[in-house]
Image (cartoon, grey):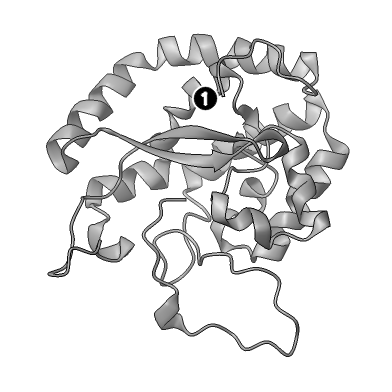
Amino acid sequence: MSYQLLPKNVPAVKRLFDLALSVPGLILLSPIVLLISLVVAWQHGFPILFRQKRPGLHGQTFTIYKFRTMKNQTDEDGKPLPDDARLTKFGRFLRATSLDELPELINVIKGEMSIVGPRPLLVEYLPLYNPEQSRRHKMLPGITGWAQVHGRNTLTWQEKFNLDVWYVDNWSLWLDIKIIAMTIVKVLRREGISQPGQATAEPFRGNPRETDAVAPKSEQNQVKEQ
């Protein structure tokens, strides 16, 4: 997805609000971005940025940018080690403070993301959503969102999706301002960073029926940054 000043179906006031925050924000935070880039290069090596395709508005994919928080360590078969084994101390700090998300300001400026919106998840989740959950893609994905200020990675997937869809149905500029203020408090308190026993959160596996078996924990290790 190339640069879009006013993405289609995005309220103009929301887009202008995003640009008013992201452009000056990236300029003001550039010394911090440079410092983090140097430490990431020293601690994790190159590349400095984590890049991955994620679904955005209407499910269209784009490349998300984040600071790398893990090393490229593999086992004897060449397979990446579990997230917990590759996540460094500095990487945990970046996640705890949400500083790993700073490069996403570039995505916001390009019109691929918004400051506030449902978080962009993995592309492989798209066919797993039911019609109601898919409605989360009716808004630009965000750096922070309604689900993030109500528990973040401590929530179940269904709770996250319910909050995302509620945001889509009830969006207002005032709500975005409220979420940003709540996000600052959550980041300072370092709340909801990860689920117990997970680097971030357990992968989403769809909407099983009540009779379906629960996947064993041995299947829960995935090499994805979320």
Provide residue 116's location: percent of width, then percent of height: 66, 32
- Regarding mark 1 in the picture, which secondary structure is present there? helix
**In the depicted structure, whether residue 156 falls above or below residue 67:** below
Q: Nearer the viewer, residue 152 or 47?
A: 47
Which residue is label 1 attached to? 107
Left/right placement of residue 187 relative to residue 145 reads left
**In the depicted structure, whether residue 210 falls above or below residue 145:** below
Q: Nearer the viewer, residue 185 or 119?
A: 119
Provide residue 197's location: percent of width, then percent of height: 41, 72
Identity, as a three-letter code, of the amino acid under mark 1: Asn
The crowding category of the residue bearing disc 1, from other C-alpha atoms within 10 Å (few below 14, some 14 to 19, many at least 20), is many
**In the depicted structure, whether residue 126 falls above or below residue 216:** above
Provide residue 131's location: percent of width, then percent of height: 82, 56
Residue at image point 52% right, 10% down: 23
Q: Give the farthest residue toward the right.
A: 169
> Image quadrant for the N terminus?
top right
Residue at image point 71% right, 71% down: 207
